[in-house]
Image: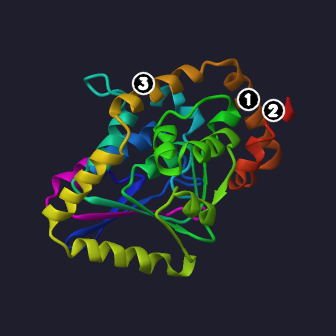
């Protein structure tokens, strides 16, 4: 990776890698993030020794956060040679990668960052420090990176509707109960727990691990056509009047209240945006 990369790859054991995402102050996901993460996935996929990859954060309070609203045009402009949106390519490459991806979630995980997190194979969340949110509806747009498609399969229709239509923050215990994450773990135990799961999976035969993943993928993943459709609907929604009106209001709230306060409690403040008109 380049010297100024947001991602650091560490060899934990011969079959285990750790990828740490650091993009202070709040780990927003921009076009540059997507390109770099896709490079990480490609690099690890080419290494036949890699069997398990743990993804974590180097920015306190945040895991993979929401999309950078200042880079939405750049995100929408990213496409593969065959016309596939690069975001769709990233999340599909993650779910089909020839390794098991494990998210070690400590901090806020929202919007586009949550959609990337949902593409990881396993998600373990700090009971005290992890929060989840799809805030798009509150700012006048629709999810576009697979949030609706994956949450409907994981949570069921009604709970997916609750998560997306309320745009609220959900704590780790609720996320575990709903099926948003694999398991919530006490923060003091999270690192050791994730390391133990990674080591156990890495100890098994690679062919059987990846074969089992392929079987489960076949039964559970949303069709790529659905992901493409959601991205197209998101691209259309950024031109809706509601989004155009709410973004300046959110910017005003950040200026008045402070970025840290807004980001730490985005689910709360997102629900107040319209009241600031």
Frontmost residue, 190 versus 172: 172
Q: Which residue is mark 1?
A: 246
- Magenta stretch: give its range: 42-61
Crowdedness of circle 3 by 10 Å Cα count: few (<14), some, many (20+)? Answer: few
- 83 in magenta: no
Q: Which residue is mark 3?
A: 77
Q: How many marks?
A: 3
Quarter residue 78 falls in: top left
Query: What is the CA distance from the residue labelled 1 to the residue labelled 3?
Result: 22 Å
x then y, percent, for residue 250: 74, 36
Q: For mark 1, give the secondary structure.
A: helix
- 47 in magenta: yes
User: Could you tell which of marks 1 and 3 lies nearer the N-terminus?
Assistant: 3
x then y, percent, for residue 245: 74, 24
User: Could you tell which of marks 2 and 3 lies nearer the N-terminus?
Assistant: 3
Query: Tag on residue 274?
Result: 2
Assign the C terminus to one quadrant of the image: top right
Q: For mark 3, give the secondary structure.
A: helix
Frontmost residue, 97 versus 149: 149
Query: What is the CA distance from the residue labelled 2 to the residue labelled 1?
Result: 7 Å
User: Could you tell which of marks 2 and 1 lies nearer the N-terminus?
Assistant: 1
Q: For mark 2, give the secondary structure.
A: helix
Q: Residue at x 49, y 64 (%)?
A: 58
Query: Tag on residue 53?
Result: none
Q: Are marks 2 and 1 in contact (CB under 8 Å)?
A: yes
x then y, percent, for residue 165: 67, 38
Crowdedness of circle 1 by 10 Å Cα count: few (<14), some, many (20+)? Answer: many
Quarter residue 274 falls in: top right
Q: Residue at x 69, y 56 (%)?
A: 264
Query: What is the CA distance from the residue labelled 2 to the residue labelled 3?
Result: 29 Å
Crowdedness of circle 2 by 10 Å Cα count: few (<14), some, many (20+)? Answer: some
**Which one is closest to the eye, mark 1 or mark 3?**
1
């Amino acid at each position: 990776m380049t010297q100024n990369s947001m991602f650091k790859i560490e060899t934990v054991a011969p079959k285990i890698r750790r990828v740490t995402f650091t993009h202070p102050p709040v780990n927003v996901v921009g076009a540059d993030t997507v390109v770099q993460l896709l490079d990480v996935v490609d690099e690890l996929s080419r290494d036949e020794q890699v069997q398990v990859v743990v993804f974590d954060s180097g920015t306190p309070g945040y895991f993979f956060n929401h999309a950078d609203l200042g880079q939405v045009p750049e995100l929408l402009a990213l496409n593969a040679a065959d016309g596939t949106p690069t975001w769709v390519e990233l999340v599909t490459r993650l779910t089909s990668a020839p390794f098991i991806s494990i998210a070690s979630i400590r901090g806020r995980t929202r919007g586009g960052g949550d959609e990337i997190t949902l593409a990881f194979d396993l998600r373990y969340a700090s009971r005290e420090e992890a929060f989840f949110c799809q805030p798009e509806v509150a700012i006048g747009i629709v999810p576009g990176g697979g949030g609706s498609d994956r949450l409907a399969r994981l949570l069921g229709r009604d709970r997916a509707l609750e998560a997306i239509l309320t745009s609220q923050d959900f704590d780790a215990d609720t996320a575990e109960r709903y099926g948003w994450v694999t398991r919530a773990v006490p923060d003091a135990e999270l690192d050791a727990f994730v390391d133990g799961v990674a080591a156990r999976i890495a100890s098994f035969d690679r062919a059987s691990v990846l074969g089992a993943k392929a079987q489960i993928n076949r039964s559970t993943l949303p069709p790529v056509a659905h992901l493409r459709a959601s991205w197209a609907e998101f691209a259309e929604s950024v031109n809706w009047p509601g989004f155009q009106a709410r973004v300046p209001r959110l910017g005003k709230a950040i200026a008045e209240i402070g970025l840290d306060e807004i980001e730490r409690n985005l689910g709360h403040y997102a629900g107040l945006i319209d009241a600031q008109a």
